[in-house]
Image (cartoon, rainbow, N blue to C red):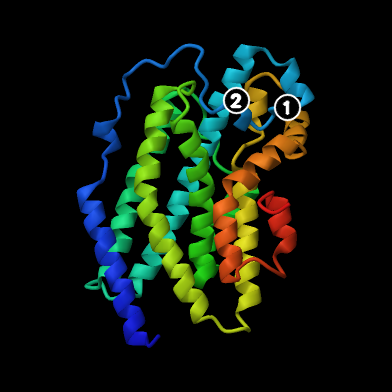
Amino acid sequence: MTRALKVADREKTAERLLNSSADRSYDPEVDIDWSAPLVDGLRYTPEHRCSLYGTALWERMSPEQRVDLSRHEVASIASVGLWFEVLLMRMLLKEVYRSDPTSRHAQYALTEVADECRHSTMFARLVERIGCPPYGPRRHAYQLGKLLPVIGYGPALYGSILVAEEVLDRLQREAMADEGVQPLVRMVNRIHVLEEARHVRFAREEVVRGMADLSRRELPYQRWLIANTSMFVTRSLIHPDVYAAVGLNRDEAHRAALGNPHWQGSLRWAGERIMAFLDEVGLVGKPGMGAWRRSFLVG
């Protein structure tokens, strides 16, 4: 495909996504009733997606403690999602900075930034409303995250976005269909899932185009970058402090979660579709396999 045809194809996709954004977007400040009471006894995530589900620690926890753990875990995931949304916005603005602002591609990137601003506010409001701390990533991941918009480029940049978005998307799709989950959490998930579908389409096509133009010399770096970024994303989802918040030994529970086959299986399940895509386009491979295994996205 010639460069002119590639640009035309990219513009056609962006035009379609801009139209979709105009037709179907949400304002969480208006579309969510933040004053509605939380429902006593309802979980905040499906029980089998809690990080300690199936462990000896889980068996010793009371039903109330399990619900409380799900509350703190959804707050941790939401605040990590917010952290990555901010990194995503920085990366998208980096792309816009060096693009023609009259192009539909740049304009859709700006539209996505606007979506992510609303999502970040929504996640912050959710954490506040359910009465949890904004856990965010652990300090080392937070500091390393500052480098991603600087060192990230090409298909690994968009691929990293996809890993974060699609892992979260699959967890949220399941939770929003579960009537045993708090209505507030289900509504937040529904808005995020519906709007992220456009972002996923945009990023997937950018990965395919980027891989087509990638030199063999650049491929190892792209594989290393996406694997390590993905590892930090999945390892950051549940902050160890959530366990202390529900009365457990922080370090013991954190070790139990990391070694828990059920939690590892949940992450592999959540990442099935994106990992199949990344493998198909050639972004999964050496020198990143060690990081992929530590991410639990690869067995």
Q: Nearer the viewer, residue 292 or 133?
A: 292
Q: CA distance from mark 2 to mark 1?
A: 10 Å
Q: Quadrant of residue 60?
A: top right
Residue at image position (40%, 23%) is 183
Q: Secondary structure at mark 1?
A: loop
Relative placement, left or right, of 192 versus 21 is: right
Q: Which residue is mark 1?
A: 54
Estimate the x, y position of residue 140 in percent, counting from the top left: 64, 50
Q: Which residue is mark 2?
A: 47
- Name the residue type under label 2: Glu
Number of numbered discs overlaid on the protein picture: 2
Relative placement, left or right, of 241 versus 30 is: right
Residue at image position (59%, 57%) is 275
Label 1: how many residues lie within 10 Å, few (<14), some (14-19) or many (20+)?
A: some
Q: For residue 88, say whether it is visible.
A: yes
Residue at image position (69%, 29%) is 52
Estimate the x, y position of residue 253 in percent, counting from the top left: 74, 29
Estimate the x, y position of residue 250 in percent, counting from the top left: 72, 29
Q: Quadrant of residue 69?
A: top right
- Name the residue type under label 1: Gly
Q: For residue 147, say whether it is visible.
A: no
In the image, is residue 273 above or below residue 133? below
